[in-house]
C-alpha cells in the first residue's frame, strides 16, 4: 500500500474522483434550487392569471417551502434558506389576504434575483 500512495497516478485518480463527486453534488443542488424557483414563479403566475385560488396558491407555495426546509437539512445552502423564507412570507400573505398583481410581480422579481 505504501508503494501505491507514492505513485502519481494514484493521486491523480483520487483528485478526479473527488472532483466528480463535488461537481455532481454542486450541480444537483443548483438544479434543485432552480426547479423550486421555477415552480414558485409558475404558481404565482397562475394565481395572478386566476388559474389558482388564493387557497390553492397558498397550499402549493407552502408545500414548496416545506420541501426547501427538508432540502436545507441535507444541503446547508444560503440560497435555499432565502427562498424558503421568501416563500414562507408569501404563504403568510396569501393566508391573510388577496395579493395584487403588483405585489405578485414584486415577489416574482425577488425570487428571480435569488441565485
Image (cartoon, rainbow, N blue to C red):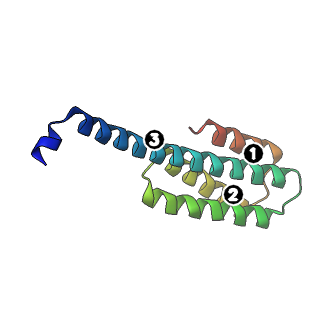
Q: Residue at x 29, y 42 (%)?
A: 14
Q: Are marks 1 and 3 in contact (CB under 8 Å)?
A: no
Image location of residue 6, percent across then percent down: 14, 37
The kind of secondary structure element at disc 3 is helix
Q: Residue furthest right?
A: 50
In this image, 25 relative to 56: left or right? left
The kind of secondary structure element at disc 1 is helix
Q: Are marks 1 and 2 in contact (CB under 8 Å)?
A: yes
The residue beneath circle 3 is 23
| Count of numbered labels shown in the rendering | 3
Q: Residues within 10 Å of mark 1 (few under 14, many from 20)?
A: few
Per the rendering, the mark at residue 103 is 1
Answer with mark 1 or mark 3, whichever residue precedes in sequence: 3
In this rendering, is residue 20 above or below 49?
above
User: Where, quadrant-wise, is the C terminus in this rendering?
Assistant: top right
Q: Residues within 10 Å of mark 2 (few under 14, many from 20)?
A: some
In the image shown, does 104 or 5 lie closer to the viewer? 5
Q: CA distance from mark 1 to mark 2?
A: 10 Å
Q: Residues within 10 Å of mark 3 (few under 14, many from 20)?
A: few
Q: Residue furthest left?
A: 2
The kind of secondary structure element at disc 2 is helix
Answer with mark 3 or mark 2, whichever residue precedes in sequence: 3
Amino acid at each position: 500500500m505504501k508503494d501505491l500512495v507514492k505513485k502519481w497516478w494514484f493521486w491523480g485518480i483520487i483528485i478526479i474522483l473527488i472532483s466528480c463527486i463535488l461537481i455532481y453534488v454542486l450541480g444537483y443542488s443548483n438544479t434543485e434550487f432552480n426547479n423550486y424557483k421555477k415552480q414558485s414563479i409558475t404558481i404565482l403566475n397562475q394565481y395572478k392569471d386566476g388559474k389558482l385560488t388564493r387557497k390553492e396558491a397558498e397550499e402549493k407555495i407552502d408545500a414548496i417551502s416545506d420541501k426547501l426546509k427538508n432540502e436545507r437539512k441535507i444541503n446547508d445552502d444560503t440560497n435555499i434558506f432565502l427562498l424558503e423564507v421568501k416563500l414562507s412570507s408569501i404563504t403568510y400573505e396569501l393566508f391573510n389576504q388577496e395579493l395584487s398583481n403588483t405585489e405578485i410581480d414584486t415577489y416574482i422579481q425577488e425570487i428571480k434575483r435569488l441565485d
